[in-house]
Image: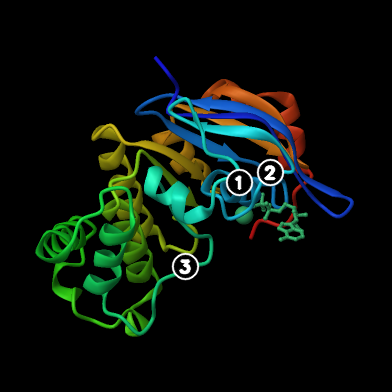
Amino acid sequence: MTPALSVRAARKTFGGLVAVNDVSFDVRQGELLGLIGPNGSGKTTMLNLISGALKPTSGAILLEGETISGLAAHHIARKGIARTFQLVKILPSLDAAQNVTAGAVFGHRRLWGDDARALAHTLLDRVGLADRAHMPVSSMTYIDQKRVELARALASDPRVLLLDEWLAGLNPSELKIGISLIDELRHEGRTIIMVEHVMDAIRTLCDRCVVMSSGVRIAEGGVAETLSDPEVVRAYLGDDDDA
Ligand code: ADP
Ligand code: MG
């Protein structure tokens, strides 16, 4: 079967810095792939290349066999890639339902009017925000803003969902809720790439993982074997900034 997403020798340089150094991997249909690595290893840059926020310096990215690298970010969103951001990005002056409706209108599904609004309410219910649908997101707690952002990404019915440290900053009970929410998405058969520092979440949720260090893919495979790979252990031991 054609992979949901193929990253082929993707490279991104910022001046003299090679943030992503000829990285390749495939994501299978319905797979939850963990993209992990120490801080500064290029994970967010990789997601930016996939979503089109940044264009690769060289290499290619294919969505279900079709080259998407080089397209504008809004075209890539239309083709079916949605994301959440390491630092939440939602429209603060709008309420939760309006934010999620925007995701339905501008995403892969292209819903309008009542259909978009109905989907928004279904998804807010799904992420546990049914009673806060009309609260301005600027007055929501951080976890609730994250929930809105996830619902907005889901509203586009993405073929591939990118989560950039979606679980970061949650307290232990919120973390449990967050992990079970992602687990449900996985069981629905969504294809997801999850950048995450929370190792328990990686172990619980991921089918496989890709490990980056200093822009290079240093390991790929099943979670248990990958996390015990000596090179991976070394890369993490050198990372004393656990933020
Ligand atoms: P991670 O998400 O793994 O922590 P990033 O992808 O954010 O890592 O960053 C990888 C490297 O690229 C870092 O050294 C970072 O400083 C650098 N970098 C990321 N984005 C930019 C940018 N827009 N301009 C210059 N350097 C950047
Ligand atoms: Mg990052």
Q: Nearer the viewer, mark 1 or mark 3?
A: 1
Task: Please give the residue where the numbered disc 2 appears in the rendered image.
Answer: 56
Image quadrant, ligand 2: bottom right
52 or 72, nearer to the observer: 72
Q: CA distance from mark 2 to mark 1?
A: 6 Å
Crowd around label 1: few <14 · some 14–19 · many ≥20 (10 Å): many
Residue under label 1, please give it.
49
Given residues 123 and 206, the one toward you in this image is: 123
Residue that numbered label 3 is attached to: 88
Residue 40 screen position, x and y as percent? 72, 52
The CA distance from mark 3 to mark 2 is 24 Å
Between discs 2 and 1, the one toward the N terminus: 1
Residue at 33% x, 79% y is: 137
Q: Residue at x 32, y 69 (%)?
A: 144
Disc 3 residue type (three-letter) = Val
Q: The disc labelled 2 sits on which kind of residue?
A: Pro
* Residue type, label 1: Leu
Q: Quadrant of the C terminus?
A: bottom right
Q: Are marks 2 and 1 in contact (CB under 8 Å)?
A: yes
Q: Residue at x 61, y 46 (%)?
A: 49
Q: Is residue 9 above or below residue 73?
A: above
Above or below, comparing residue 142 to residue 4 in the picture? below
Give the secondary structure at mark 2.
Answer: loop
